[in-house]
Image: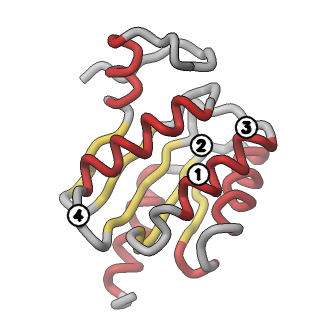
Amino acid sequence: MNNQIDAKSYGPDSTKAEIKALQNRIWLHEPDVVYLKEVPVQSEFQIEIFFNQIQTLVDKRYNFYIIIDLCEARRPPAVIRAYLQKRFRSFKDQIGYTAVFTGKNFLLNIAAKFVLGRVFDPDNFSVHTSLEQAENAIKQFRENGA
């Protein structure tokens, strides 16, 4: 699966290969866990591709979890943060828990908390430095019967 992309803003002029590479950055990590590998430079066009891919993967499943990998991402501008909040709200009732990991990027930790905190209850998301921590957060959320 090719999910390597260039660090640029993708728009309607993107090629079919670029769109496929963007779609390939989202997959089922587990049957009920979506893995989203964020791009370095976000755009509204790319966000729509991502959320359409999530919709395709989860189909009509009411409850799923999401891991967001921000290790390659740059801090998005305010307009993109607002757009992300809008799109996450469209899935709010379906997403049981969101676990984000950023590597050790302090600014992205803050941005992720800001975006998700405006959409989800504080008990329904967490921000981590590694994939393992994010996976454990979802596991713990499941075990606690939430």
Which of the two marks, 1 or 3, is nearer to us in this view?
3
Neighbour class for label 3 at 10 Å: few (<14), some, many (≥20)? Answer: some
Q: Which residue is mark 1?
A: 129
* Dot 4 amino acid type: Lys
Helix, strand or loop under label 3: loop
Q: Which residue is mark 4?
A: 60
How far across and down, in percent of the image, does residue 35 sit?
Answer: 37, 48
How far across and down, in percent of the image, does residue 104 sit?
Answer: 66, 44
Mark-to-mark CA distance, 4 and 3: 30 Å
Mark-to-mark CA distance, 1 and 2: 4 Å
Based on the displayed image, in which of its 4 quarters is residue 1 positioned? Answer: top left
Neighbour class for label 4 at 10 Å: few (<14), some, many (≥20)? Answer: few
* Dot 1 amino acid type: Thr
Helix, strand or loop under label 4: loop
**Badge number at residue 76:** 3
Q: Residue furthest front?
A: 12
Report the side of 45 relative to 65 (left or right).
Answer: right
Mark-to-mark CA distance, 1 and 3: 18 Å
How far across and down, in percent of the image, does residue 38 sit?
Answer: 52, 36
**Badge number at residue 103:** 2
